[in-house]
Amino acid sequence: MKQKFSVLLGVAAALLAIGLPVFTQTTAALPGQVAVGKEGMVACAHPFAAMVGAQVLARGGNAVDAAVAMSFALGVVEPYASGLGGEGYMILALADGTQVAVDFRAWAPGHVTPQTSRATYGPQSVCIPGAVAAMDLVLREYGTMTLAEVLAPAIELAEGGFPADEVYVRRVLDAFKDLSDPKYAEAGALFLPNGLAPDVGQRITNPKLAYALRLIAEEGAEVFYTGEIADAIVAATEGWITKADLAAYRAVVREPVRGTYRGYEILSAPPIVAGVVVVEALNIIENFNLSRYGRYDHPTVVHIIAEALKLAFADRDPVVWDPDFYEVPVTGLTSKKFAAERAKLIALDKVIPPARVPVGDPWQFNSTALPVGVGAEADAGCTTHISVVDKHGNAVSLTQTLSSFWGSRVAVPGYGFLLNNQYQNFNLYRADRPDDRNVAEPYKRPRTVIAPTILLDRGEVFLVVGTPGAGRIPGVVVQTIVAVVDFCLNLEEAITAPKFYSRNAVANLEIEGGFSVGTIEVLKTLGHAIKEYGPLDLYFGGTNAVMVLADGTMIGVADVRRLGGAAGP
């Protein structure tokens, strides 16, 4: 595998050296961002990680093997977005009928209380990382390869290096002040060679990360949670994270959030993240015949989806918390009857003012709560997504993050990776809000809105989809599904179609460039306060998806909003 991977790595480096544009005002994908095949397919936010996944499939690995290998590879080539110090959620739909969600959200340290102060960056912004535990878990339970085998490409990338693309350089420049701060000297030493941002095309190596990855390959996940890497994390966080905290961490296998939309089965990520928003919004939208309006960007279509998202977010806010601490009315939130009642609030000639969105009561439609102990806000701004389908019909939808770009800014000395800053996603304790359940407690997860999702058609994988994009994530997933199901857009069209952001906590309907002037004017007459962005704006994420057609053809598309990659074996 190593020799073949090295050849492909050189081909990709040559493509980057040509100077292909990273950001474009057209809807055309760049070379390598759309792929077609029948032997398996991957899509993710970086072409090198896509090649890693394709080569794992080519060697006979399954979708889980490929997703884990891609996860580790993305931590090398997108160190600002995810890595060993991060966390996330994944959905698995396997050919043998297994359908599970794997929760590897970060936990608060064991010593905290609701009154413990939080920080945006630095040691006191860190939660216990879950990525390594989750990759080890799914590989052992559902994969076919060893940890050493799936780590080999990431180790090679870290040692041999890769050319910085424009996205990488932009991310460094955006954080240059912090990375130059003596408080974060270890991070600066890793990502500012000679104290300067790298140039596009400059080779990036990380031998310290290669060493950490090799340790994990040789000694297993235990070295991260109880061994020498654990000791280094404790030192890097000045004791904020303890050895006991790391040893206590477990990734948890949960039941996916389930729903249907116009005959397709939906599997998405359960609380404490946002699959319930995706399912409820689609349930509400299902009460309207969108296709009668003829096109995806029709103002009435935008209006209905925007109102549905506001209602779904409003319903989520009072009842979705860490399920290891509180009951969550999942069946109520995903109930068709509940959605039908909520849909009655949508008028086609006026908006529901975002500040006055009425909150529904999902408990009255709830047959069973998600019980305490099933296995555990601000929005995550830095995220990356992986979609994989193999030739046997196994599928993985995996979203992972550090929370903010560059996470806590705390790099672990000697091991080459950043720690997350998920602790900032807890709410500050307020005496006037004694029932706030998103306050910190020992080993609790903070609430965020990632939503890796899989659609099935009569039990067979049809669409694997997910995106980064903070609060925009559930809406972008919903809009992509609507574009495919209701308007029969092909996958590239559905992903590049302009998106919008609607939420009860957001005053404006935030619109990506690409909608017609006429559509925007009609939306204004309905009462939407419009905030416009440019075309293909990174603010609206970077969807990476795989679609399986009826004849078995697989189409992978990496969002043109980022320099992603799609590939088959």
Image: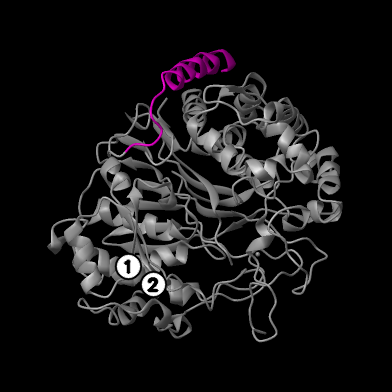
Colour scheme employed for the rendering of this structure: one colour
Quick one: 424 or 481, which is closer to the camera? 424
Image-based side of 560 in relation to 488, left or right: right
Residue 397: in magenta span: no
Amino acid under label 1? Ala
Say which residue label 2 marks. 310
Q: Residues within 10 Å of mark 1 (few under 14, many from 20)?
A: many
CA separation in Å, label 2 and label 1: 6 Å
Q: Is residue 15 magenta?
A: yes
The picture quadrant where one finds residue 548 is: top left
The residue type indicated by label 2 comes to: Lys
* Percent coordinates x, y for residue 367 in the rendering: 47, 79
Task: Please name the residue shown 64% across and 73% down the image.
Answer: 372
Query: Residues in magenta?
Result: 1-24
Q: Residue at x 65, y 71 (%)?
A: 427
> Could you tell me what secondary structure mostly forms the magenta stretch?
helix
User: Which residue is at the front of the view, 90 or 212?
Assistant: 212
| Residue under pointer 1 | 306
The image shows residue 157 at horizontal and vertical percentages of 61, 24
Q: Quadrant of the N terminus?
A: top right
- Whether tag 2 and tag 1 are in contact, CB under 8 A, the answer is yes
Residue 391 visible in the shown view: no
- Image quarter of the C terminus: top left
What residue do we see at 59% from left, 65% from top? 447
Question: Considering only vertical position in the picture, is 412 above or below 166?
Answer: below
Residue 247 in sight from this viewpoint = yes
Q: Secondary structure at mark 2?
A: helix
The spot of residue 191 in percent (x, y) is 67, 33
Image coords of residue 168 (percent x, y): 54, 34
